[in-house]
Image (cartoon, helix red, strand yellow):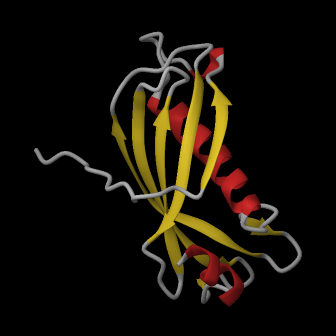
Amino acid sequence: MARVKVALPDTFSFTTQIPVRITDLNYGGHLGNDALLGLLHEARVQFLRSLGLENDYDPVSKLGLIMVDAAVEYKGEAFRGDVLHIQMAAADASKYGFDVVYHVHNQAGKEIARAKTGMLCFDYNVRKLRLLPEALAAQVR
């Protein structure tokens, strides 16, 4: 069976730190795969805020970003008390969206995961894709 491989960019434009909480652990005593996706979502909101977006959805215009796919390549375990250093960059911009690529390490520098989420501009009023606003497109190219 072919394994997922997440290609990393040469540089990352944003980094954040998020601690692993007790509620992020699974029955094996380490960071659960479902919890990692939640932590990546928090990191993505912080990344988008750094690009000038308050979050990935505007309740007034009902225009937002919708995640259409996710790929995670697990590299190591993380435990309660670890502080995850999550590096992010936009990649593969198109007329409707872009990818966010993540590189996750713990505080000691041990690689925990690589991930990619595909984000598309979505109009919740008409439930259809919209063109990525030019101001955002310019930042993610």
Q: Decide: is 25 above or below 15.
A: above
Q: Position of residue 48 (x, y in %)?
A: 69, 61
User: Where in the figure is residue 8, as x and y percent of width and height?
Assistant: 37, 54
- Residue 74, position in %: x, y? 35, 34
Q: Residue at 55%, 23% (x, y): give it.
A: 107
- The quadrant of the picture occupied by the N terminus is top left
Position in image of residue 75 (x %, y %): 33, 31
Q: Residue at x 83, y 80 (%)?
A: 61
For this view, does 15 lie left or right of residue 59? left
Foreground of the two, 116 or 25: 116
Residue 82 sits in quarter: top right
Q: Which residue is located at x 47 percent, y 10 percent?
A: 29
In this rendering, position of residue 107 left or right of residue 5: right
* Picture layout, residue 88 above or below residue 96: above
Looking at the picture, does residue 91 appear above or below residue 96?
above
The outermost residue toward the right is 60
Q: Is residue 79 left or right of residue 136?
A: left
Quarter holding residue 110:
top left
Residue sitting at x 55%, y 32%: 35
Picture quadrant where residue 138 is located:
bottom right
Q: Tell how many labels.
A: 0
- Whether 119 is drawn above or below 46: the answer is below
Q: Residue furthest front?
A: 11
